Amino acid sequence: MSAGRDQETAVPVMETSAALASAGERLVGEAVAALDRRPHAYQLASSPQERRECVRHLFELVIQCVRDGHVEPIIEAAQQIAAARYTAGFDIGETQAAFNALEEVLWRQLADIVTGDQQIDALARINAIIGAGKDALACTYVALASQRGSAPDERAATPGAAGGAGGSTGSGGTGSGGRAAGVQTDVQGQVGVITLDDQRKRNALSARMVNGVIAALESLQAERVRAVVLRAAAGLRVWSAGHDIDELPRGRRDPLAYNDPLEQLLRAIRTFPAPVVAMVHGSVWGGAFDLVLSCDLIVADETATFAITPVNLGLPYNTTGLLHFLGRLPMNLIKEMFFTAAPLDARKAREWMVVNHLVESADLEEYTLGLAETMASKSPMAITVIKEQLRVLTDYQPVAAQVYERIQGLRREAYDSSDYLEGLRAFAERRQPVFRGI
Ligand code: KGA
Ligand code: KGA
């Protein structure tokens, strides 16, 4: 993950940090109490005293980040915690819960002591800091786990797949059946290529697949590649079927919450410090469309189609996701695509400037790699900072707390509804859903 993300929240903040620090012991106590009250399914590695120390440590890091105006301290600490938990054989559920409990208490405290625009700023800052910590925790853990779980790809190289002389190859997922299910990573010169390869499930973005891509991005970042191509394996007709519908919560929980693996992947791509190019052959569905739109450029061939399909499932799409669309496409196209769920074909996608380049299938790979190589030959520092500036400028949408809460309330009504369950059931039963609006 890029360590410098969310630095847009770096505004003068002495009042906030002082106000929180002065209430430190009480807030830590409340967070520990909230943590102890929560039902949990994770492994408890620590004593009550150690849990308190952990919460205090996280609290002090949050204060430091607020004061310093950047998120590196919490990222570094979260990476160390993840590595220690992994080495000791524990999962990270306990630390994630500590982050959540702390977030809850800090939000409450800030809502009490800060008002107006400053309150929004302060809440956004806490959100960004704790989000960065949780991201770093999860990504480090996943990267360690997938390094251990990764096996050499037993399959012969896919014809047409990137790789070859001078390239290194790793695998973020393991095989099943004749064709490896998962993620393959190759490096060609200064360009990394991540290949989605789960024909059986049409490259549905399961947690396993997504974590494989996140781990691949992290390893490519460590190798300092200067551009990345994200593609489906050669020969697949479906680029990706979108979020793994089997893994969507069955009601009463936000289906696209902040920590949903796909959401984590979108953030990892958007904050990746080099250009990420989506190379699209075949159909792109639902959350996979959000994924390709989160890439910096899209190159497609004439087989490409794009659909955004939450209305087929009765799923209230998340606000961050809608902002991704708003940042890239005109409102009338967004509405038509969301309201009809109809695929947009490659020619129309070009007309609407969804894709940067539409090329012949036979040329797709060479063209995309050529484009990536051109970007890889330019100044990486200038590219990184321009990408980050563009992200910050387009992502930063101050929304009043009550407006956001209202939107969440409306979304909750939809994902608590019978229609949402009907949408999921209909997909599993391979039939058209019958929506009743309740
Ligand atoms: N999640 C889980 N499993 C999926 C899946 C998905 N998104 N898409 C396909 N599969 C499974 C499917 O259940 C089947 O499993 C196998 O992949 C092959 O699919 O063999 P099984 O165990 O029955 P299928 O349908 O037989 O393949 P096909 O005839 O080639 O059709 C391919 C498509 C992509 C057209 C079809 O599978 C499809 O319509 N999939 C769903 C596309 C979609 O609407 N995705 C959106 C998911 O929602 C989402 O991303 C969000 C968050 N959203 O929209 O808001
Ligand atoms: N600044 C200073 N001198 C320049 C120059 C520039 N931008 N562009 C050309 N020259 C000088 C060049 O050094 C040469 O001087 C003369 O103009 C003719 O150029 O004769 P001298 O003393 O050696 P040249 O290259 O011989 O002419 P040409 O073969 O006709 O080629 C023309 C172009 C425009 C293609 C070539 O000169 C060139 O590539 N120039 C640089 C174009 C460029 O990348 N500009 C961006 C500058 O940066 C910028 O605006 C910002 C802020 N940015 O990108 O962020």
Image (spheres, helix red, strand yellow):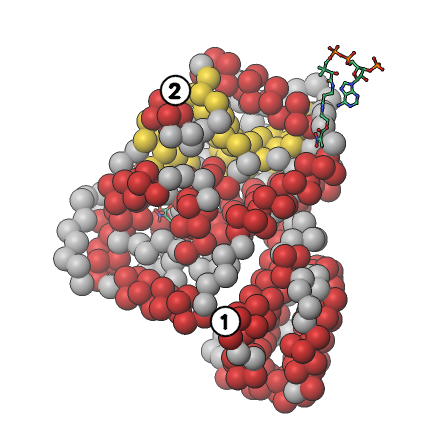
Neighbor class of circle 2 (other Cα within 10 Å; few <14, some 14-19, many 20+) is some
The mark found on residue 110 in the picture is: none
For label 1, the residue is 41
Q: Amino acid at mark 1?
A: Ala
In the displayed structure image, the side of residue 262 where residue 386 appears, left or right: right
Which quadrant holds residue 101? bottom right
Which quadrant holds residue 27? bottom right
Q: On the rendered image, what quadrant is the C terminus found in? A: bottom left
Q: Quadrant of ligand 1?
A: top left
User: What's the CA distance linking mark 1 and mark 2?
Assistant: 47 Å
The mark found on residue 302 in the picture is: 2
Is residue 268 shown to the viewer in this render? Answer: no
Q: Nearer the viewer, residue 419 or 159?
A: 419
The image position of residue 83, as x and y in percent, is 71, 59
Q: Nearer the viewer, residue 31 or 425?
A: 31
Q: Residue at x 65, y 50 (%)?
A: 1
Label located before the other in sequence (1 or 2) = 1
